[in-house]
């Protein structure tokens, strides 16, 4: 499950870069496609993170990482939306 979670995060970073580049180029259709795929990837990240937390002992480290992960997802979403609005 760790590999799936890490792969989903790497894919999210790549999709974030693709979406920002397409938005700066003015290609709105490609931006929307990348953004929607990124939102689906967020679900994979959250699901695999929940599975990882439930299969291990819940300590402060894991709880802190989970909260930070959700904050990072929220910040990336806000970044893309604000860039789109100008």
Image (cartoon, helix red, strand yellow):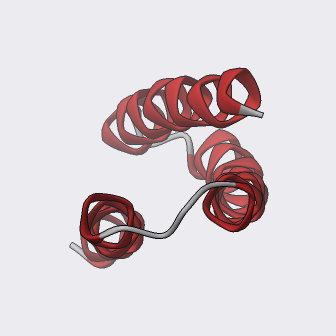
20 over 7 or under it: above or below: below
Q: Compare residues 67 and 11 and report the one nearer the observer.
A: 67
- Residue 29 relative to residue 27: left or right: right
The quadrant the C terminus occupies is bottom left
Q: Compare residues 79 and 13 and report the one nearer the observer.
A: 13
The residue lying at 53 percent from left, 35 percent from top is: 9
Count of number-bearing discs: 0
- Residue 56 relative to residue 55: left or right: left
78 over 50 or under it: above or below: below
Q: Is residue 79 in sight in this rendering?
A: no
Q: Is residue 40 in sight in this rendering?
A: yes
The residue lying at 44 percent from left, 39 percent from top is: 16
45 over 4 or under it: above or below: below
The quadrant the N terminus occupies is top right
- Residue 40 relative to residue 60: left or right: right
The x and y percentages for residue 45 are: 65, 53
The residue lying at 36 percent from left, 72 percent from top is: 63
Residue 39, quarter of the rendered image: bottom right
The residue lying at 78 percent from left, 58 percent from top is: 40
The x and y percentages for residue 52 are: 67, 52
The x and y percentages for residue 35 are: 62, 55
Q: Compare residues 78 and 65 and report the one nearer the observer.
A: 65
The x and y percentages for residue 50 are: 69, 67
């Amino acid at each position: 499950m760790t590999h799936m979670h890490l792969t989903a995060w790497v894919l999210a970073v790549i999709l974030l870069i693709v979406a920002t580049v397409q938005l700066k180029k003015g290609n709105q259709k490609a931006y929307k496609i990348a953004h929607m795929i990124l939102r689906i990837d967020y679900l994979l990240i959250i699901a695999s993170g929940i599975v990882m937390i439930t299969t291990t002992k819940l300590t402060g480290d894991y709880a802190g990482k989970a909260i930070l992960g959700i904050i990072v997802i929220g910040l990336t979403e806000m970044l893309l939306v604000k860039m789109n609005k100008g």
